[in-house]
Amino acid sequence: MLKSPAIKVSHEFLGFAREIKECISREKEVKTCPITINQGVLRTCISRAYYSVFLMARHIMDLDYYDRPDVHRIVIDRLKDMELRDIADKLFKLRQERNRADYDIHVNFTKNRVCYIVSIAESLLKELEKHLK
């Protein structure tokens, strides 16, 4: 069975976020990390973590090709309609973090915060995969 592009990209985005998380988490153990950890990388990591979950949720909602700006809200609303409020609430919080990472240059993200956000994305993706058709 072929994976949909949404599922493939979702896993690729989370894979990138996990790599950053590993570099951050094991920084003292590993002398070299192929990525320079700075605010740009931390912010990108948050963004990819959010989008990994969002893309999977959008796919489950059969909205892969819906590309209007309100798609983020619609996906969250549909999760609630499916009685997946906990997932919807956590996805909403991830979206808030992604918006802060993308738009609020005055926020300074810590490595611990980024690892926490990626952990949430990992658990949400695992939960969402249970709802794949």
Image: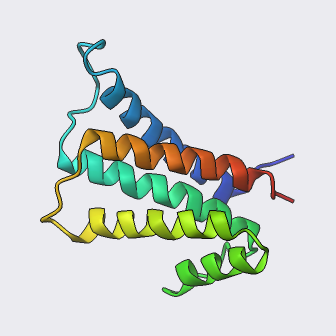
Choose between 37 and 83: the one closer to the eye: 83
The answer to which quarter of the image holds residue 85 is bottom right
Instruction: Residue 112 in the image: state x and y as whole percent.
Output: 31, 40
Location of residue 118 in the rendering, given as x and y in whole percent from the top left corner? 46, 45
Instruction: Give the residue at the far left of this rendering.
Output: 106
Residue ID at (37%, 53%): 46
Residue depicted at 42% across the width and 33% down the height: 19
Above or below — where is 42 with respect to 102? Answer: above
Horizontal relation, residue 55 to residue 17: left or right: right
Q: Quadrant of the C terminus?
A: bottom right
Q: Residue at x 34, y 21 (%)?
A: 26
Q: How many numbered badges does the structure rendering display?
A: 0
Q: In this view, does 68 lie to the left or right of 105?
A: right
Q: Where 29 falls versus 78 (above or below)?
A: above
13 sits to left or right of 116:
right
At 28% across and 47% down in the image, what residue appears?
42
Quarter where residue 65 is shown = bottom right
How was the colour assigned to the protein in this rendering? rainbow
**What x and y, as percent, mark residue 40?**
21, 50
Toward the viewer: 17 or 78?
78
